Amino acid sequence: MHIALIYMASGFSRRFGGNKLLAPLAGIPLYRHGFDHLQDAARRIESALSCSCRLYVVCQYDEILSWCRAHDAIAVKNAAAGEGMAASVRLGVEASAAADAWAFFAADQPFLSDETISDFVVQYAQSGCGIGCAVSGSRRGSPAIFSHVYKDELLALQGDKGGRAILEKYKDDLWSFTMPEGELCDIDTRDDWEAAERQLEKKRLD
């Protein structure tokens, strides 16, 4: 079995006022936080499921692609980032076409830990369902994981739509995973970034 972890890092950061993925959070570019967690999670998943698990980074920024490629990820250039999220989904699936399942992660969630990621993927694999998604409070959606059964539907997505429509369409094949509170925090604005800095500093001091 091969599981592909698709790291989507193609956004334009319009609400942030600059490329947030390169903005230093606790001294490390934002995208690196999630990248490191996913690489660690891939090793955990391989051990738990005795499978192959690889990280694929879909991104429009050459600086990020070069760094990720040099650190053992498969880097996929997104020249269609202006279309929206669907382009990242399609490119990730195309780059890992032989995978048995695709798990999608956003590059602006630095608090999503490697333990939580691996628990999410491993428990999905054990659930018997074809689709899995994260739940935190009233929020449901990303990260999400899809079996190969949904390959054609993932490749058919268009525009600024991720896999949410597929989640809604196949609720009878949907498994949900409750995420620890706070791990799905997105960095969208400068205020979000400042709050994340304070949280990381508090964690460091504790």
Image (tube, rainbow, N blue to C red):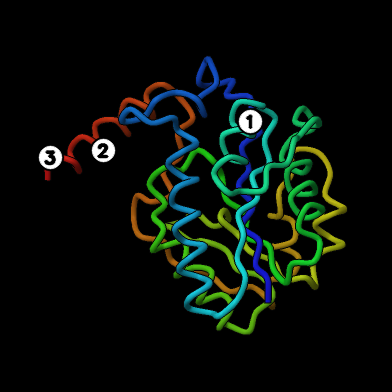
Residue behind mark 2:
200
Q: Spatial distance from mark 2 to mark 3, Cα to Cα?
A: 9 Å
Which residue is denoted by mark 1 in the rendering?
11
For the point 76% across and 65% down, which residue is it?
169
| Residue 50 percent location from the top left of the image | 55, 80
Q: Nearer the viewer, residue 122 or 98?
A: 98
Q: Does label 1 or label 3 sit earlier along the sequence? A: 1
Q: Identify the disc placed on residue 151.
A: none
Residue 135 against residue 112 in the figure, above or below: below
Residue type at mark 1: give it. Answer: Gly
Residue 166 is left or right of residue 73, and the answer is right
Circle 3 crowding by C-alpha within 10 Å: few under 14, some 14–19, many from 20: few
Looking at the rendered structure, the kind of residue marked 3 is Leu
Comparing 102 with 194, the one in front is 102
Q: Position of residue 128 (x, y in %)?
A: 63, 84
Other-residue count near label 1 (Cα within 10 Å), few / some / many at <14 / 14–19 / ≥20 = many
Q: What residue lies at 71% left-to-right and 40% top-to-bottom? A: 85
Q: Which residue position is annotated with label 3?
A: 205
Residue reaching furthest to the left = 206
Relative to 171, say whether 205 is above or below: above
Examine the image and state in which quarter residue 29 appears.
Answer: top left
